Image (tube, grey):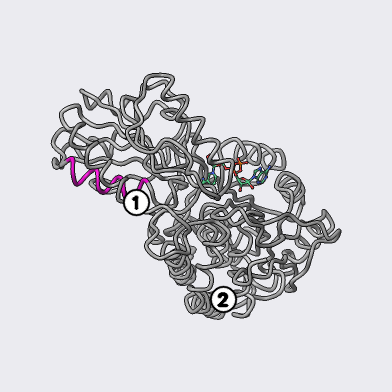
């Protein structure tokens, strides 16, 4: 075990615990392939305890005055801010991203929590002028205990988006964080515990993902299912929740097109797009992943993109100066290799990278492919890794058709100097998250979420709270 890592336990009903049967799974440092910890796995008995705790926790938390709730959440955010160095280190050890990225993620989610805590104070209902003698009002109330399932790519970001919105809205939550990155989730939950969140309002479990989700979704007390992850798993969980008539929030995959128009500056576009491409080794649902560049700019764009890829320092995220860590797990390396082999077999050229690095750890080189045909797998399947396929277009309408042709609709990016063309892109893209002249990341003040198979519901902004609230219409006939 590595001393710098952290203690891994589940948190149920306000207490840290191991799983009922003592079953565990190893946690691996992706930069070294060493086992750094053992994460406990829940039994169905543990899950039932977590749901019972969430029922009690909901009653306690929803009836806590909003000023106190906000104070507790802000205190948790302050603890996380104080501990950002340590939390970042835990995150880098278990997920691989460079330490500054990991520390930045911890600080960002603390700030997002503050934003949600304050926004919840404005979850107003309304009084409606009534047509008769009744007082007609609309109230917003927390939906109830939430079951949430989150992945490994943002070990702080993904759990905190669910926890912040759920707790701010007054819900309780049972969250299954990723068994591959459990330490960051434990550190986060410790902040809430020390800040004074009532027992049962926040419960953290790990386990066999399919077993845990099936059990929690079927639990009658669970009132909302929130998931971040792949489209196939999202569809499975949404179908399960639908069978129980439970609402869902689904933050699923994407395959974000970047359209570089004929009037754009190819050098600036390439620098900005490449920076976003290789963040978190490309393991981001909004990562720019299909580069459609006007034929007149393709040479300059590609040259600058390759320069940016060459400048990336790949290595152990704990080391100074490293700008891209390993992939989070062996599955992703294999997936990258398969995508490159397929693209090359269809005529693409590997301009940079193209394979795993010859060293221990799940390292894959920043990869640039050109001349990639539209039917190559990397152009139609979410790559979720550091591969940039670049292809030329002639006509902007055709490029937009290509951009919208896939079942994804999460993020899309456009580069142009013309405000009219920018507006054409904004109207034309079928996607929930758009950036013009840069590749912007998520911000907590504004909603993120997808169209089409990329999911439904929004995280961030006032919309982020919406999913965790229910609406009551109340008409009150006054009596003397
Ligand atoms: P996966 O589809 O097996 O798992 C994705 C996530 O869902 C993981 O966290 C996993 O633990 C969880 N999961 C899997 N089956 C589950 C179930 N039945 N119930 C509850 N949770 C379940 O794939 P993976 O290898 O972990 O990741 C690969 C793909 O997942 C990527 O290609 C990417 O498309 C997608 N992904 C998306 C996001 C995102 O932010 N939208 C994050 C991580 C992974």
Image x and y of residue 464, in percent: 48, 56
* Left or right, residue 402 beside residue 20: left
Q: Relative to 258, does residue 313 appear above or below in the rendering?
A: below
Query: Which image quarter: residue 389?
Result: top left
* Left or right, residue 255 beside residue 150: left
Which quadrant is home to the N terminus? Answer: bottom right
Q: Which secondary structure class fits the magenta region best? A: helix
Q: Relative to 132, does residue 432 appear above or below in the rendering?
A: above
Magenta stretch containing residue 267, yes or no? yes
Q: Relative to 405, does residue 412 appear above or below in the rendering?
A: below
Which quadrant is home to the C terminus? Answer: bottom right
Image x and y of residue 478, in percent: 59, 67
- Camera-side mark, 1 or 2: 1
Query: Which image quarter: residue 39?
Result: bottom right
Please give the name of the residue rendered at 24% of the width and 36% of the height, measured from the top-left corner: 302
The mark found on residue 312 in the picture is 1
Image x and y of residue 362, in percent: 54, 47
Given contact means CB atoms under 8 Å apart, are the residues at marks 1 and 2 in contact? no
Looking at the rendered structure, the number of numbered marks drawn on it comes to 2
Q: Does the residue labelled 1 lie within 8 Å of ligand 1?
A: no
Front residue (pair 197, 61)? 197
Please give the name of the residue rendered at 46% of the width and 42% of the height, measured from the top-left corner: 385
Image x and y of residue 367, in percent: 38, 39
**Mark 1, residues whose alpha carbon is within 10 Å: few (<14), some, or many (≥20)?**
some
**Pointer 2: what residue?**
69
Question: Is residue 176 visible to us here?
Answer: yes
Q: Does the residue labelled 2 lie within 8 Å of ligand 1?
A: no
The residue tagged with tag 2: helix, strand or loop?
helix
Q: Give the range drawn in magenta.
A: 266-277
């Amino acid at each position: 075990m590595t001393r710098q890592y952290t203690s891994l336990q589940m948190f149920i009903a306000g207490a840290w615990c191991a799983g009922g049967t003592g079953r565990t799974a190893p946690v691996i440092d992706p930069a070294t392939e060493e086992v750094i910890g053992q994460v406990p796995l829940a039994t169905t008995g543990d899950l039932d305890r977590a749901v019972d705790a969430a029922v009690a926790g909901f009653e306690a938390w929803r009836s806590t005055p909003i000023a106190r709730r906000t104070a507790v959440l802000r205190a948790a955010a302050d603890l996380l801010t104080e501990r950002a160095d340590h939390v970042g280190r835990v995150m880098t050890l278990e997920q691989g991203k460079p330490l500054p990225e990991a520390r930045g993620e911890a600080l960002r989610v603390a700030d997002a929590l503050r934003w949600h805590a304050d926004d919840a104070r404005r979850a107003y209902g309304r009084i409606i002028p009534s047509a008769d003698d009744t007082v007609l009002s609309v109230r917003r109330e927390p939906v109830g205990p939430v079951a949430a399932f989150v992945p490994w790519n943002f070990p702080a970001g993904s759990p905190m988006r669910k926890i912040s919105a759920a707790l701010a809205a007054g819900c309780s939550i049972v969250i299954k964080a990723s068994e591959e990155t459990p330490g960051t989730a434990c550190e986060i939950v410790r902040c809430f515990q020390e800040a004074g969140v009532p027992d049962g309002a926040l419960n953290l479990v790990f386990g066999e993902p399919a077993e845990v989700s099936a059990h929690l979704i079927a639990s009658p007390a669970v009132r909302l299912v929130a998931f971040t992850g792949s489209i196939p798993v999202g569809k499975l969980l949404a179908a399960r929740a639908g069978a129980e008539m439970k609402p869902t929030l689904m933050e699923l995959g994407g395959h974000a097109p970047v359209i570089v128009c004929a009037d754009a500056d190819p050098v600036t576009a390439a620098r900005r797009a490449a920076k976003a491409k290789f963040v978190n080794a490309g393991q981001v649902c909004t990562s720019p992943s299909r580069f459609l560049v006007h034929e007149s700019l393709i040479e300059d764009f590609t040259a600058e993109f390759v320069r940016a890829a060459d400048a990336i320092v790949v290595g152990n995220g704990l080391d100074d100066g490293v700008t891209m860590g390993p992939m989070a797990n062996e599955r992703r390396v294999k997936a990258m290799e398969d995508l490159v082999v397929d693209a090359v077999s269809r005529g693409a050229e590997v301009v940079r990278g193209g394979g795993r690095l010859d060293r221990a750890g799940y390292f894959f080189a920043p990869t640039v492919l050109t001349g990639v045909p539209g039917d190559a797998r990397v152009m139609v399947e979410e790559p979720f890794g550091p591969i940039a396929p670049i292809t030329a277009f002639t006509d902007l309408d055709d490029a937009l058709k290509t951009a919208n042709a896939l079942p994804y609709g999460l993020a899309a990016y456009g580069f142009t100097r013309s405000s009219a063309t920018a507006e054409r892109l904004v109207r034309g893209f079928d996607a929930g998250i758009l950036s013009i002249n840069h590749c912007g990341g998520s911000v907590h003040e504004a909603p993120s979420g997808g169209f089409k198979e990329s999911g439904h519901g929004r995280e961030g902004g006032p919309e982020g709270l919406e999913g965790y609230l229910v609406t009551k219409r109340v008409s009150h006939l006054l009596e003397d």
